[in-house]
Image: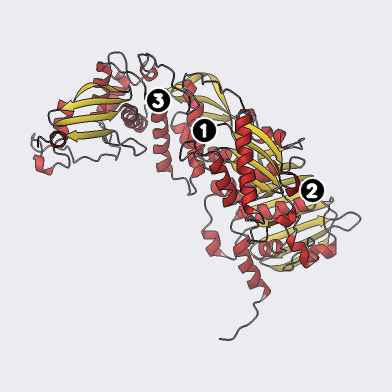
Amino acid sequence: MKIRILPDDIANRIAAGEVVERPASVVKELVENALDAGARKITVDVEEGGRKRIQVTDDGEGMTPEDARACFGRHATSKLYEPDDLFAIKTLGFRGEALPSIASVSHLVLETQAEASAGTVIEIAGGRVVSEREQAFPRGTEITVDDLFFNVPARRKFLRSESYELSQITTYCTHYALAFPEIHFVLRSAGFEILAAPVTTGFRDRIFQIFGKDLLDQLVEYQKDYGRSGVKVHLFTSRPHVQKYNRNSMFFFINRRLVRDKIILHAISEAYRNILPAGTFPVVILFVSIPYEDVDVNVHPAKTEVRFKHQSFVHDAIRDAILSGLTQDKTIVPMESDGVPTSPFTAPAPQPRIPDSWVSDDPIARDSFALEPGMRAVMDQAIPLGLNFRASETKTDGCEEPAEFSAYPEFDRVRQEVQPLGQLRDSFIVAVDSSGLIVIDQHVAHERVLFETYLRQKLAGKLDIQRLLMPILVQLPPRQLVILDSIIPELVRNGFEVEPFGPKTIAIKTAPAMLKASAVEKLLVELLDGLERETQVINIEALKKKIAATVSCHAAIKINTPLEETKMRWLITELMKTDVPTVCPHGRPIILRYDLREIQKAFKRA
């Protein structure tokens, strides 16, 4: 087999596989070009998550007709002149691969005009120039990319949902808006403005602009200049009580270049070791300035990976800066209005003798420990939820099935005999039956009861909804606004009425009646955090159960809540009626059972 040089169109498609992974990759490359061109305003318009159209407009220096034609050649760039330039790269782009790669897998239109030069329009389809003409245009550049991957159907097939692709685009635009507060950024999807970030005076104002006052108040700002090394660290990091369930709230910039780096992640993990619980993450917005010759950005075509010349020094500088910021911060975090401490290091406040979730306005339980008439009617309908782990309870000729056919032959006996003895640390119910000891986690037990009740009410069309006295206003980052927009129909079906209230704010007007008003905002944010963490297309059936599980978790009684014997009996009775009494909706165990034989064996009586 002879070796031959690949034609340019095939070479460009191969390069596109490395540079252009999805619509967000196109946006990233075009925005970086606009930044390198000295733009003061960058506008990104997309349709169908970037599948149908991506348009990036800037007011940078623009291109002459000669440069406009040359920019579509492979490795054509205005940013490198000498071999040594590779060792001190000052621009975001430099490889000269992005435009030819994008043009090879789309229908692309370039409109540009430089100062004192004629405007130029070039149309390209699948890497081939279709037309070129002169046309008046404001100084700057506009690139329109239509039908991305139209000639690479395999790549187009692997794109995900419109909302997911749009969320990835939003992430990139948010990152660069943070890094360049002196530039006006706009992101629109089908005419709807997702991100609007006018020019501000610095990083702090830009964070306020994008994320709002609530998040900014949770951050500690710290700056450190490491002298002759040339390393400067400017960071905003969250106080210990702020705990996220994913890394999506971490933003890293090296010389204002967006990067993903394991060294930085490790430094942050080391700084927060013994401060945050395992599996939770802080909010970190990190800007590191470093001499250009001490960082190599020519590692991967996507230009998001870097190598540091002094790796250990950079790692320790970031770790120590975070620790110094947290150490110097003496802010005492106020407790939330419902009395639940926000810091994991604060002792829990004394709880009332009657749990909040069982006060008189709770539709789940009353002082008599009976369900509301409306709810009881729903429960009595025995609506199948598809959750049952037990054997069928169908009877034949009025007789119960033989015990040997039951998956859990002792369950009915346990249900009839179980008697509560008391609580362990006001969190776990200790009970007995005739052949063993039973320990029940009261929070997840109540959560399971509420979860199945909620699903039955919803299936029966009898979900209790409360209209809030005052709408709850919640500020969301742009990415979560995109996710929220995709799940609003399901939220409505679950009793939430959510409406836009300004560019970054939503108003919650109604919520399920089982929720306290103080828990509504926290629930919605937690739900969006969870969905943001998931990379797959949002599954509606899974979403239904996720919403039900989140609602029931927030409405359930908490640990450290004393219960009277009658309330313990009520909870055990209702738990035993559920389809799945052994695990909570999130998969945690509810019941632990210690058989009498095991106890006798432990005391050497077996």
Q: Is residue 107 above or below residue 419?
A: below
Identify which residue, 343 or 322, lies in the foreground.
322
Most extreme residue toward the bottom, as rendered?
2
- From the top left corner, tell me how far across and down residue 419 is, in percent: 19, 23
Identify which residue, 47 or 432, lies in the foreground.
432
Q: Amino acid at mark 3?
A: Ala
Q: Is residue 554 above or below residue 529?
A: above
Element class at badge 3: helix
Q: Earlier in the sequence, mark 2 or mark 3?
A: 2
Q: Is residue 275 above or below residue 57?
A: above
Report the label total.
3
Instruction: Note whether residue 504 is visible.
Output: no
Element class at badge 1: helix
Identify which residue, 59 or 374, lies in the foreground.
59
Q: Amino acid at mark 2?
A: Ala
Most extreme residue toward the right, as rendered?
116
Instruction: Note whether residue 426 is visible.
Output: yes
- From the top left corner, tell me how far across and down residue 168 is, in percent: 59, 48
Is residue 202 shown left or right of residue 22? right
Label 2: which residue? Answer: 39
- From the top left corner, tell me how far across and down residue 32 is, in percent: 72, 53
When asked about the image quadrant of residue 306, the answer is bottom right
Q: CA distance from mark 2 to mark 3?
A: 50 Å
Q: CA distance from mark 1 to mark 2?
A: 35 Å
In the rendering, which numbered label is found on residue 555?
A: 3
Marks 2 and 3 in Cβ contact (< 8 Å): no
Element class at badge 2: loop
Label 1: which residue? Answer: 525
When asked about the image quadrant of residue 29, the answer is bottom right
Marks 1 and 3 in Cβ contact (< 8 Å): no
